Amino acid sequence: MMEKVEGMKKDNRLLEVLSSKKAKYAIGTVLLSGLGIALPRIFHVLAGASAGATYLPMHIAVLIAALTFGALSGSIVAGSSIIFSYLLTGMPSLARLPYMLIELVIYAVLLGLLNKKFNKYVSLTTTIILGRVLYAGVLFVAINLLGFKTYGISVIESIKAGLPGILIQLAFVPFIAKAIEKGIKLHD
C-alpha cells in the first residue's frame, strides 16, 4: 500500500514539473525544432526541389515558436532547425546556411518583441515586412561592404518566389500559435 502511495506522489510530482511554464517552453521549443526539420523535407517530397523557396516551411516553425513562446524560443528553433536540417539532409546548402540563419533569427526576434506590444496578426504582418527590410540591409552589408559572395541571394526574388509561403504564414501561423497556447494552457 505504501509503495502505491509513493508511486502516486512521484507521478504527481512529474505531472507538476511537466506542467510548469518552463517545461512547456522547453518541450514546445524542442517539438517546434523537430517540425522545422521535418516540414522542409515533407514539402520537398510533395512539391519538389524548389518547395523551400516557394513555401518557406522552415519559417513556419520559427514563426510559431516566436509567436507562442517568444524571441529566444524562435531563435533556438531557427538555429537548431537549420543546423540539424543541414547535417541530416544537406539543406540548406552550406553557402546558404549562414544567410538563412540570420534571416530566421531576425524574424524570431522581431516577432517575439512585436508580439509583446501588438496582437498576433499585426505582429506577424509587421515582422514579415520589416524582417525582409532588415534582411535586405544585412545582405547589403555582407555583399557590398564585407565583400561576401551573393550565392544568387536576392530579397526581391525571394519575396516573389515565396509569396505562397508568406500567404500560408499569414493564414495559419496565428491560428496555430493560438491553438497551442490554449491547448497547453500557457497563460494560466
Image: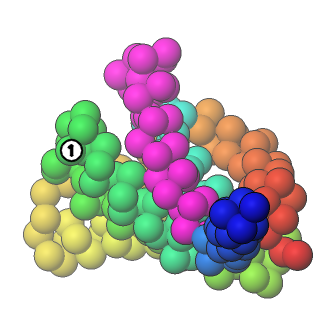
In the image, 22: left or right of 76? right
In the image, 71: left or right of 139? right
Residue closest to the eye, 23 or 73: 23
Main SS of residues in magenta:
helix
Name the quadrant containing residue 164: top right
Image quadrant where one finds the N terminus:
bottom right
Residue closest to the eye, 70 or 20: 20
Q: Position of residue 178 (x, y in %)?
A: 82, 57
At x 47%, y 53%, the residue is 33
At x 50%, y 35%, the residue is 39
Magenta run includes residue 74: no
At x 16%, y 50%, the residue is 95
Residue located beneath label 1 in the image:
87
Residue closest to the eye, 120 or 167: 120
Asked which colour scheme the image uses, the reply is rainbow
Q: Amino acid at mark 1?
A: Leu
Q: Which residues are magenta?
A: 25-52
At x 33%, y 52%, the residue is 82
